[in-house]
Image: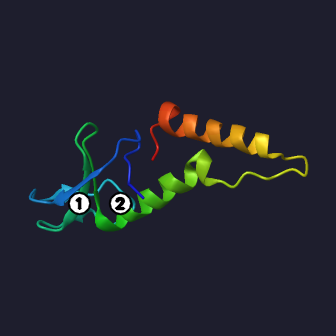
Amino acid sequence: MQPKCPSLHRLSRCRNRVPNLVCDGRCGRGRIAVYSWRWSCDLCDFDVCEECATQLAVETDAAHPLSQPTPKSSSDTSHQAVISLSDAMRHQFSACGFQ
């Protein structure tokens, strides 16, 4: 699971070296301690603590359409399963870059 910012950019993990850096997540702590781990998106100026990054990763994965099970009908055939797999792969690699 890879945490992402609200714009869906992948966050990178690094040690915080910035005093008084504010966590943009929902933990309620406010500041990210110096030398603790933080997750950042340089494009969006978005920084979160380790706890919030874990929550973001879970939320991002749960919201992705391929993470939801697809109900099967009694008329499914192996041909339909191949088409579904192809559609899933096309979505994964072309539409959103989710891995």
Which quadrant, please, contains the N terminus?
bottom left
Residue placed at 52% from the left, 32% from the top?
Answer: 95
Q: Residues within 10 Å of mark 2 (few under 14, many from 20)?
A: many
Observer able to see residue 27: no
Residue type marked 2: Ala
Q: Could you say which disc has been placed on residue 38 in the image?
A: 1
Q: Is mark 1 on a helix, strand or loop?
A: strand
Left or right: residue 14 compared with residue 3: left
Q: Do the residues labelled 2 and 1 touch (CB within 8 Å)?
A: yes
* Quadrant position of residue 3: bottom left
Residue 56 position within the rendered picture, expressed as x and y whole percent measured from the top left = 42, 57
Residue 11 position within the rendered picture, expressed as x and y whole percent measured from the top left = 30, 50
Furthest toward the front, the residue is 78
Q: Is mark 2 on a helix, strand or loop?
A: helix
Ranked by sequence position, the earlier of labels 2 and 1 is 1
Vertical order, 6 against 14 (above or below): above
**How is the protein colored in the picture?**
rainbow
Q: Could you say which disc has been placed on residue 92 in the image?
A: none
Residue placed at 90% from the left, 46% from the top?
Answer: 75
Q: Disc 2 and disc 1: Cα gap in Å? A: 8 Å
Residue placed at 65% from the left, 43% from the top?
Answer: 85
Residue placed at 61% from the left, 41% from the top?
Answer: 88
Foreground of the two, 97 or 51: 97
Q: Could you say which disc has been placed on residue 53 in the image?
A: 2
Residue type marked 1: Arg
Residue 22 position within the rendered picture, expressed as x and y whole percent measured from the top left = 23, 56
Residue 41 position within the rendered picture, expressed as x and y whole percent measured from the top left = 27, 45
Vertical order, 34 against 91 (above or below): below
Observer able to see residue 70: yes
Foreground of the two, 3 or 75: 75
Left or right: residue 6 compared with residue 37: right
